[in-house]
Amino acid sequence: MKSKFAVDHRKGSRFRKRGLRAYFEYRDLGIRRATRGKVVAHVIRARPQKAPHGEWHAHDCKLQFVYVLKGWALFEYEGVGKVMMKAGSCFYQPPGIRHREIRHSKNLELIEIVAPASFKTRALPEARRSPGRGSRG
């Protein structure tokens, strides 16, 4: 199947409260439809008065790439440790890596690209700590 040309302008676009995490809002960028489900791209922003749960999980996907537009977020990755992501930070999460979000700023906004567009997220038990590794970023 051939992909289609797609364009999405901020004006007129809406953030939706429906998505993977209840503490985020999502603005679809039209890539899922254009690629016929091969890739999803969306802008994610923090919802007011909502905090991350800090639950360990992993995603069953082939690619996950995130670029922080505004604010900051503190993540923890098994085998890596805590990593502070700030505006301008870009990160690639290897498929299946066990991780969690610990906290984020009220103004957090980021772009996330995932392939395939539909993927499973598995809740996981507490991860093993990374000995000798501190906070990165």
Image (tube, grey):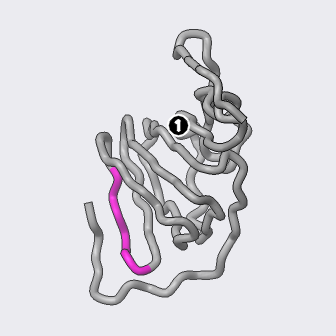
Q: Residue at x 27, y 66 (%)?
A: 136
User: x, y (%) of residue 119?
Assistant: 70, 55
Vertical placement of residue 137 versus 36, above or below: below
> Residue at 56% across / 17% down in the picture?
7
Q: Quadrant of the N terminus?
A: top right
Residue 126 position within the rendered picture, expressed as x and y whole percent measured from the top left: 58, 81
| Quadrant holding the C terminus | bottom left
On the image, the x and y values in percent for residue 38 come to 66, 43
Total marks shown come to 1
Magenta residue span: 79-85
Measuring from the top left, give residue 59's x and y in whole percent.
62, 63
Q: Main secondary structure of the magenta part?
A: strand
Quarter of image, res 49? top right
The image shows residue 131, relative to residue 52, as above or below, that is: below
Vertical comparison of 119 with 12: above or below: below
The residue under the point 42% across, 56% down is 92
Q: Is residue 35 magenta?
A: no
Residue position for label 1: 45
Residue drawn at 34 percent across, 89 percent down: 131
Is residue 82 on the magenta stretch?
yes
Q: Residue furthest top?
A: 11
